[in-house]
């Protein structure tokens, strides 16, 4: 659920269950969602009278629905009549050109032994862009704060140099934009868009590994920015040496800068993260609760965020006491117990992404050499990374039975014994899949 329209649609469904169709049409047929940011939902309706009814009669329901969706508190603002025009005018003036950086600052990043070096390097780059540690490459497993540091660099540089041209994107976004530029004949505009940047922030660069055209374009983009004395910062889930399909020229450029790894936080750092995250949400946790969370979640800061938000919801919505049993319930809801087992959808998505295809290509009947290879690899991974039977795997693809699946798996197994390229492909896709745990 990504768009504002989808979120508002979910809330309207909840409202519609509790009122008559006549009441729904009277109060909500012309009520639209305007904005959702900074834990505030902004709506617009046609009159002052309708605004009063929506706030007084349905405000609690709307806020409870937002709790349900996001596990944290939201404010509600309802505009009436011509107020929308003034709101849009003010918001357009005040809105940051880089909304993804909101909230990602160095002072909100908890520093410990596991990330101290990466944090110091990030601050040095943010204070002296293009002068030292260029490029800066931050790597580590998912959920440990790489993106936070990346965006904090952007936020600091934007504050100190508002005139800078800054680009933030993910590795697969770069690929998708390049494909679109080729299809629409706008390659020159695409090249100028990124090669003239004062600061390039690229998240999850591992997703361009193995994509020849993407790596070629990024190589020239990298050189243009670097030779102009401008700053490049990248993140990935592993160091360049472990990306076997990364272009050698790119690997050399990256390794010529500073590489900083981010490890799983120790228990003291996890404790500080828990206390600070809870405080930011207005929650004071008992020591035994903090200790239980710190001992239970050991390798993923993002999961700590999820647990704290869930506890906030329990307290605010259900008026639950925050104690160890409550935390056990919250942890059960947020993290998986035992080893990570990816879904078939994730395996197909990541395999398709690696081969520059769509998931529907793998599931469908396309028989090109590239598609067939991707399909066989996805079946092999599904067999090795999940508990699905051959029949269950076949059901993920149109018209494939268990014998077809078995033949595909055996073919990939044979290739792994003698073909280093296939081994690298399977290893890279597996890493991308596991990074989504």
Image (tube, rainbow, N blue to C red):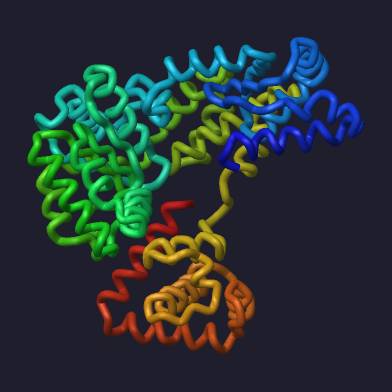
The residue drawn where x is 9% and y is 29% is: 131
Q: In this view, does 112 lie above or below 261?
A: above
Residue 362 or residue 340, whichever sits in front: 362
- Horizontal arrangement in the rendering, residue 77 relative to residue 117 (left or right): right
Whether residue 426 can be seen here: yes
- Horizontal arrangement in the rendering, residue 295 relative to residue 233 (left or right): right
Residue 149 screen position, x and y as percent: 31, 32
Whether residue 207 can be seen here: no
Residue 13 screen position, x and y as percent: 78, 37
Residue 348 screen position, x and y as percent: 50, 66
- Horizontal arrangement in the rendering, residue 424 relative to residue 73 (left or right): left
Q: Is residue 218 above or below residue 234?
A: below
The residue drawn where x is 31% and y is 24% is: 155
Tell me the quarter of the picture where residue 160 sits. Answer: top left
The residue drawn where x is 41% and y is 61% is: 353
Quadrant for the N terminus in the image: top right
Residue 275 screen position, x and y as percent: 49, 22
The residue drawn where x is 53% and y is 27% is: 290
Q: Is residue 399 above or below residue 350?
A: below
């Amino acid at each position: 659920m990504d768009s504002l329209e989808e979120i508002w649609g979910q809330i309207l469904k909840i409202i519609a269950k509790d009122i008559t169709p006549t009441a729904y049409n009277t109060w909500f047929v012309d009520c639209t969602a305007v904005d959702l940011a900074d834990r505030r939902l902004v709506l617009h309706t046609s009159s002052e009278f309708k605004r009063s009814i929506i706030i007084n009669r349905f405000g609690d329901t709307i806020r409870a629905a937002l709790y349900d969706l996001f596990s944290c508190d939201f404010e509600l603002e309802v505009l009436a009549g011509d107020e929308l025009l003034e709101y849009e005018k003010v918001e357009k003036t005040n809105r940051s050109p880089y909304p993804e950086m909101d909230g990602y600052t160095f002072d909100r990043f908890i520093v410990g032994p596991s990330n101290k070096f990466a944090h110091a390097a990030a601050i040095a780059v943010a204070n002296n862009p293009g002068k030292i540690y260029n490029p800066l490459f931050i790597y580590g497993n998912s959920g440990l704060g790489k993106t936070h540091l990346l965006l904090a660099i952007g936020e600091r540089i934007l504050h100190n140099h508002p005139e800078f041209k800054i680009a933030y994107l993910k590795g697969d976004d770069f690929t998708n934009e390049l494909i679109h530029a080729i299809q629409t004949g706008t390659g020159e505009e695409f090249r100028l868009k990124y090669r003239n940047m004062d600061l390039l922030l690229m998240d999850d660069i591992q997703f361009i590994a193995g994509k020849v055209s993407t790596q070629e374009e990024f190589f020239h983009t990298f050189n243009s920015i670097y030779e102009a004395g401008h700053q490049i910062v990248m993140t990935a889930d592993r160091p360049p040496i472990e990306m076997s399909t990364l272009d050698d020229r790119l690997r050399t450029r990256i390794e010529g800068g500073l590489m900083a790894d981010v490890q799983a936080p120790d228990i003291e750092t996890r404790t500080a993260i828990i206390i600070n995250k809870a405080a930011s949400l207005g929650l004071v946790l008992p020591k035994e609760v903090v200790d239980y969370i710190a001992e239970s979640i050991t390798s993923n800061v993002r999961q700590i965020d999820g647990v704290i938000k869930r506890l906030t919801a329990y307290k605010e919505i259900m008026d639950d006491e925050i104690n160890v049993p409550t935390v056990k319930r919250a942890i059960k809801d947020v993290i998986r117990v035992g080893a990570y087992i990816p879904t078939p959808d994730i395996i197909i998505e990541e395999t398709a992404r690696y081969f520059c295809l769509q998931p529907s290509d793998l599931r469908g009947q396309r028989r090109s050499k590239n598609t067939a290879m991707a399909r066989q690899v996805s079946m092999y991974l599904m067999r090795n990374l999940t508990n699905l039977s051959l029949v269950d795997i076949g059901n993920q693809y149109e018209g494939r039975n268990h014998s077809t699946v078995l033949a595909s798996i055996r073919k990939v197994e044979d290739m792994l014994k003698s073909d280093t390229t296939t081994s690298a492909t399977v290893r890279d896709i597996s890493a991308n899949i596991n990074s989504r745990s």
